[in-house]
Amino acid sequence: MKMNLGQPPRIPTQFARTALGLQTMEEPHSRPLSLCRVNTKSILISRAHMLVHAIALIVLVRYRASLFFTEMNPADRPPALAWLLISLAELMLSFSWLLNQAYRWRPVTRAAFPERLPEDGELPPIDVFVCTADPDREPTVEVMSTVISAMALDYPPEKVHVYLSDDGGSPLTLHGMREAYDFARWWLPFCKKFEIKTRCPKAYFMDDEEEEDGDGVDVRSSDEYDSEKRKVKEKYELFKARVNGYKARCRGDSSLRSRDHPSTVELIRGSSADEVVQADQQDMPLLVYVAREKRPSHHHHFKAGALNALLRVSGVTSNSPYVLVLDCDMYCNDPSSARQAMCFHLDPKLSPSLSFVQFPQRFHNISENDIYDSKMRSYFWTSLCGMDGLKGPGLSGTGFYIKRESLNGKSITNSIGTDAMDLRKLFGDSKEFIKYLQQNDQPSKSIIHGNSAAFRKEVEFLASCEYESGTKWGQEVGFLYQSVAEDYFTGFTLHCKGWTSVYYSPSRPQFVGTSTTNLNDLLIQGTRWSSGLAEVGFSGFCPLIYGSLRMPILQSMCYAELAFFPLYCLPLCIFATVPQICLLNGVAIYPKVSSTYSMVFSLVFVSSLWKHLYEVVTSGHSVQTFVNEQRMWMIRSVTSHVYGTMDAILKQLGMRKASFLPTNKAADDQQSKRYEMGLFDFQTSVMFLAPMATAVTLNVASFVGGITRALVLGGWDKLLMQMVLVLFVTVMSYPVIEGMVLRTDKGRVPRSATLVSTVISSALLYLSSCFLGY
Ligand SMILES: O=c1ccn([C@@H]2O[C@H](COP(=O)(O)OP(=O)(O)O[C@H]3O[C@H](CO)[C@@H](O)[C@H](O)[C@H]3O)[C@@H](O)[C@H]2O)c(=O)[nH]1
Ligand SMILES: [Mn+2]
């Protein structure tokens, strides 16, 4: 059987040549492919707020500093340690506020016009990379649904090549791919014929009842549609049954999850030949399974390593100039994303410096009230739009179309050389790979005749663990290994090299995935992110220094905000303990209510809450979202951010190795039920529960103690501000209090954790009162 790789893609028209940056720009196209709108109203409001808030912060800092220089009655002077800690916390939060303003300086929104794209024959080819690592945590049927949704993109099929990287090297995944290919033979024509929009089979059959809206209504209101749908559903059920049957047969087989396996590359042709018509392969995208070699003796660099292996294997297979990267759970929810992305990549004004088009991550499993802030509103609605108005959004790991050339390690002004020795030092010893690389964006002619032995040998060599030694893969070339947040660091480095990017968020979500919807997964994932980000902040690549020399200062502030946000665990831990301990001991650390300074403190507090609320509401979210975000910010800060930061410091000292536990994507019924009901699930380790419960115990104790003390001894004037702060934290922590004392279900805070936290808070109180001299 011969594989059809399509025509060797040409670079046909002047238009496309220009867009691919192969020639200098000529006359601009009359009707633009995309538009960019600056959000003037939001900018005006933000900048006015910045001015007011900044003045208030300056007054506040001055107040803190002045105390060190004014003569004071020793009895009135607050304890130095408490004063220092609070000043430090306020200073750090003010700095964080400053960095955050970069996102609000010039946010933009974009529009794309795919109908203005050139003819299909002139569109550039695309490679799609899907990564999976563990068939237990990432159910195979779902991974295959993602693969199928990518094969079903609305794009000329001979120009789409889908690669799946299987880091587990699992026979189940390989088997799943063959089954997926068979099913796709039914699925793809069905989607095309009836103009189905939801082309991820799992999602399509899940919301079976809800009729799709859109262009295809006429074609779908026929008996023919009903009967074909029934047939294709049968095929889907068969596909699932076969994959799950295979899984059941190999249960307990350790090869299902292997960390020690050779490289396997296979062009998928499906498993059953019976019902297959030869000709329909013409309409099927190429599908390739890649399990790179993994050995315990070699560091495999997690997802970045997997993506680099795919870059190399695809480099000698289809070598498309553009690559779409997807996490295994992130399916294509709308087939038009490739064309939408091309509106930017082929826009002659943007194209020469454009590295990637990032779409937002949206999730299908988030409940109405989203108690854990799983949708990450502030990142996907505020931060990325803000960066888009500067040099472009950061990379967010999945759902982006990237120009292959931009991953070759060179800066925008400096293309790769031609010296064979130099190229081998950068890219390794594969002559084939270097040959196609040098042909620039021109994809290779079809070299795969069937599955020729030479081709097989070459791709297996490219996917072997030895291949990268002595090369620049992961350091300069491809996705970078420096941080476990490979997406953040790779995007940052691209911007440092002068590349730009675009954030596009059309109303129908283009990519939809599975989010973390239980506290345990969320905090583990948060720890990994914090560690990966802080790692960059602490390294020689610190965005404020390395970045600000290479990109506009505002853009580097955005990157710094991300790299440093785990560090705000320090001010938050201070705010969760110091005012509380002081309150219990009757020590005032804020100005008296009757003084003017108290107005300034109140202004800062109210103004930051108001601005946050304003952003939440104007992005179309509810007040509940605002509360959830405040609460999760506090919870994350005293848990995952602390551990992430510690992890990054230990890594920096060489005392810890990087790790990447893939997020669990398999749902647990009981947990899902609690989540849907809006109940926190505290089934997580004591490591996470202890700091959370300690902070809550301290707050409640100090609130009760503080009020009692004021009632008996007076001193409302000097302690009221502290009481308000403590009350605010206590109210925000209500779910934790409820979990500790009111709930009896399995998701409550275990008694052991409550006990541990009571012991820690008592110890803290005892020690600190010694410090305070009481
Ligand atoms: O050794 C590994 C580990 C992970 N993965 C894959 O990487 C993807 C992302 O992993 P996941 O466990 O889903 O991590 P998340 O924290 O949910 O992912 C976010 O954060 C990562 C960086 O920490 C980014 O790479 C992701 O794109 C981004 O969605 C998944 O498809 C995994 O299969 C691998 O291929 N090899
Ligand atoms: Mn994920």
Image (cartoon, rainbow, N blue to C red):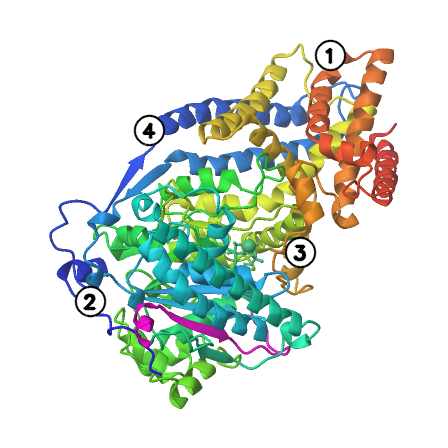
Percent coordinates x, y for residue 380 in the rendering? 47, 42
Q: Disc 1 to disc 3, how far (Cα)?
A: 42 Å
In the picture, measured across the screen, residue 275 lies left or right of residue 664, that is left
Percent coordinates x, y for residue 26 in the rendering? 12, 55
Q: Quadrant of residue 455?
A: bottom left
Please, what is the three-letter code of the amino acid marked with disc 2? Ile
Please, what is the three-letter code of the amino acid marked with disc 1? Asp
The answer to which of marks 3 and 4 sits earlier in the sequence is: 4
The answer to which of marks 2 and 1 sits earlier in the sequence is: 2
* Residue at the image point whose x is 85% and y is 17% from the top: 709
Local secondary structure at mark 3: helix
Mark toward the viewer: 1 or 3: 3
Crowd around label 3: few <14 · some 14–19 · many ≥20 (10 Å): many
Local secondary structure at mark 1: helix
Local secondary structure at mark 4: helix
Q: Which residue is mark 3?
A: 647
Please, what is the three-letter code of the amino acid marked with disc 4? Thr
Q: Which residues are magenta?
A: 278-300
Q: Is disc 2 in contact with disc 3, using a CB cutoff of under 8 Å? A: no
Q: Is residue 296 magenta?
A: yes
Q: Is residue 240 magenta?
A: no
Q: Disc 3 to disc 4, how far (Cα)?
A: 41 Å
Q: Disc 4 to disc 1, how far (Cα)?
A: 43 Å
Q: Disc 2 to disc 1, how far (Cα)?
A: 75 Å
Residue 413 higher or lower than 752, as above or below: below
Mark toward the viewer: 3 or 4: 4
